[in-house]
Image (cartoon, rainbow, N blue to C red):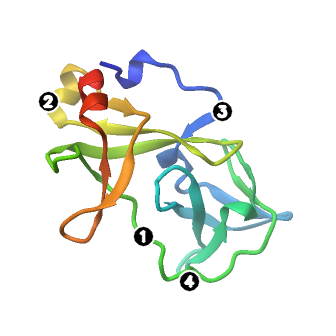
Amino acid sequence: MQTISDRRMDEREMRLLRILGLPVILGQKRIGHVERVALDEQGKQVRGVVIRRGMGPRRWVGREGVQVLGDVSLVLQQTPGRLPPDVQDAPHRVTDESGLTLGRVTDAWLRADTLDVAALEVTLGPCEDLLRGRLRIHGWAIQPAPDGTLQVVISRREWEVLT
């Protein structure tokens, strides 16, 4: 089983949850903070970033507008625009091909230089987290669930290797 502690993160990878709240810089000015990071339909790349300043409206910048994703800030190379209406929340439920719920996605690792998703962190529950740690999956697909939300699907073979 490959847990989070078994594999050191590549120095170019950073946790998605660590990005939330970072200040967003355009030119020499702070224009807000990262409220949310949206992934593409396959869950393999960052689609864009939702930015908010105070109680103002949310704004959007696509991945092409991100110049640098650093440890202390997100630097843009273009002015944020309106939030697209089709931006969805990231999927949380993890299932196998038959629909059996295996766990929940708790975080993702992004490559800071390419904005690609390197891996997903999956919890099997609090007891498993204490006993074995959280899992890190590298192969997945995103599919609609019967209730209309999105879910992460991994193959039975990948699941057996992990557990």
Which element is circle 4 on? loop
Residue position marked by numbered label 2 in the rendering: 127
Residue position marked by numbered label 1 in the rendering: 88
Q: How many labels, in total?
A: 4
Q: Earlier in the sequence, mark 2 or mark 3?
A: 3
Gap between marks 2 and 1 measured at Cα: 30 Å
Gap between marks 2 and 4 measured at Cα: 40 Å
Note whether 136 is above or below 110 in the view shown: above
Taking the image as shown, residue 35 lies to the left or right of residue 12, namely left
Q: Earlier in the sequence, mark 2 or mark 4?
A: 4
Q: Residue at 52% of width from left, 49% of height from top? A: 44
Gap between marks 3 and 1 measured at Cα: 26 Å
**Labels 2, 3: front one:** 3
Say which quarter of the image contains residue 139.
top left
Note whether 148 is above or below 9 in the view shown: below
Q: Position of residue 8 (x, y in %)?
A: 51, 20
Q: Earlier in the sequence, mark 3 or mark 4?
A: 3
Q: Which kind of residue does numbered mark 1 sit on?
A: Gln
> How many neighbours does mark 2 have within 10 angstroms: few (below 14), some (14-19), or many (20 or more)?
few
Residue position marked by numbered label 3 in the rendering: 12
Which element is circle 3 on? loop
